[in-house]
Amino acid sequence: MRLLTWNINGVRTLPHYHPWNTCKNFDEILNKLEADILCFQEMKTGRKLVTKDVAVPPSFDAFLSLPISKTGYSGVATYTRTKSCTPLKAEEGLSGLLQPKPSLSVDERISKYDVYPPRLLEDSLDEDELDFKDLDSEGRAVVLDFGLFVLINTYCPNDGTGTEEREKYKMDYHKLLETRVKGLIEKEKREVIVVGDLNACAAVIDHCEGNLMVAKGLAEGLEGEEGFWGKAYRRRMRDWLQERGGPMVDIVRRFWPDRKGMYTCWNTKISARETNYGTRIDFILVTPGLVPWIKAGDTLPDIKGSDHCPVYIDFHDEITTSTGEVIRLRDVVGSQVESKDPPRVATRFWEEFSGKQTSLQQFFGGRAKSSASTTPKTKTPPALKPTPTPPILEAAESSTPPSSNPPPIASTSTSTKRKFAPEPVSAPKKAKKEIKGQKSIAGFFAKPLAPSSSQSFDVDMEDEDYKLALQLSQEQDQHHTSSPASPQQSGNSKGKDTTQSKQAWSTLLAPLQPPMCHDHYEPTKELKVTKNGPNKGKKFFICSRPVGPGYDKGRSERRREDVDPQYRCNYFKWSSDVRREMLNNAQAEENP
């Protein structure tokens, strides 16, 4: 039996990547991963957006926890193969407070009521009390009971925003997770497996710049590896493992204790996967009692489709205890009853997929068919006479200002209709004739007028190439309007100006040649700003070399002695500045 965990970074985007785009449906994607239990994180979807293909695959039972309010954010899913391992019980969330309708009975719950975190922590919480419902509202955990073990599939919060509020949320969630596991182990003597994206490294070797962090800490007067353990969540993750007296075993690292570069996550925005510049934040943690069952474990970095890669463990089919007893895995994992339905939390029992609730498409489709079959055929009504234009609309459509006198009240007489019949307006036609033709090059580049006075164009948001072209055309127009001193001077000046203008326009419209970076003197590469903000859409050049440990982030973020010149240097320049330099250089060559 294989258990696999993977942060897929969006269930709706995964099928667009190879090789998943060759699969006919989501069930084929699941089967292609060749696992019996699949745990996904970052589903990035909402309940209203989940398709039947994802919720009810034929070969698997699905258990989903999705965010309550933030659609397209977070979300976890656990898929269990129906022929090999049907879970005994299932729950959404870690607190025990998230319940289906009707709520789970005592027999359907995985734990007793007093083993859940709200009861375990009620005597130890201070004024910074945990908000359990809020911590479980983002769709971050699904818990399944397989008999031999309790499986927790979780997606821990990251600290991407860097705010104190979000850092506290992250630490509170880690506390909630640890408390749930502690209750299972200590109160109920259960074996536990925790899988997922925990968003924290467990050792220096798990980070591509771990050694650099340690070196920087030593230079600042810290001792040992303290430079790496500055983040509280890293220390919490480290202390949760058996090596530090914790209850959990990092089983994949147990198989590969000295392997470097065993990363599971890379920043795709800087193409970090090319040079394996990543971190290991996706884990499979087990309690010590399960270690004899685990046959192998590893990462799958060659599987693409996300900024993370899958992590898996394989189980032995059977083990022999110290007393000589042989225990088969199939006898202790999951339901032993064939064709048994999964727990009620499974998505197949959601109203929209169980047949209890009609989908919108079926609802309106049925209404349309019903109305089409019951509505009698009627003759097409005769064409109606054109309705006279109300005076208020006629005034609005006319280009002439309305009269100060109030409009007369419309009557039903024929004369009134003739009086208010629309008449052709000649003013707009004359205006069109006057605009005919192009007055200047600057007029060609001019932006269209705003549709209303309430809308204004932000000059700072103009494209830099457009502003450069407009400046060049305006200078040319201004020169043509000035009168020369004599006809001979006029001819010479005109010829010279024409040549310079052609060269300037050729330079402006020519393909932009990538500048050379300062450190390596190699052609740079051009990128575009995609993040929302004042610079969105602008292009820029950076060093074309890949990132790696010690690449130059700038003096404020990287010590000079830690810079590795084989990786990307700190070169940066806006594309508009590069083009402006090209134009200035061309003009300088013409006028030495």
Image (cartoon, grey):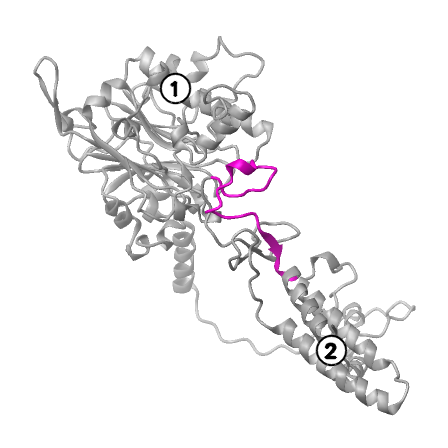
**Type of amino acid under label 2:** Ile
Q: Label 2 to label 1, Cα distance in Å?
A: 70 Å
Quarter of the picture holding the C terminus: bottom right
**Type of amino acid under label 1:** Trp
Quarter of the picture holding the N terminus: top left
Residue positioned 48% across, 21% down in the render: 226
Q: In the drawing, what numbered circle is on residue 240?
A: 1
Residue 523 placement (x, y as % from top left):
52, 60
Residue positioned 55% across, 55% down in the render: 517
Q: Quick check: marks 2 and 1 in contact, CB under 8 Å? A: no
Residue 382 sits in which quadrant? bottom right
Residue 538 placement (x, y as % from top left):
61, 57
- Horizontal arrangement in the rendering, residue 341 relative to residue 229 (left or right): left
Q: In the drawing, what numbered circle is on residue 228?
A: none
Q: Earlier in the sequence, mark 2 or mark 1?
A: 1
Residue positioned 23% across, 22% down in the render: 291
- Please, which residue is most extreme toward the bottom here? 487
459 is higher (above) or lower (below) than 116 = below
Residue 579 placement (x, y as % from top left):
64, 65
The residue under label 2 is: 441
Tell me where the magenta segment starts and ends, as one range: 550-576
230 is higher (above) or lower (below) than 402 = above
Residue positioned 89% across, 89% down in the render: 486
| Label 1: which secondary element | loop
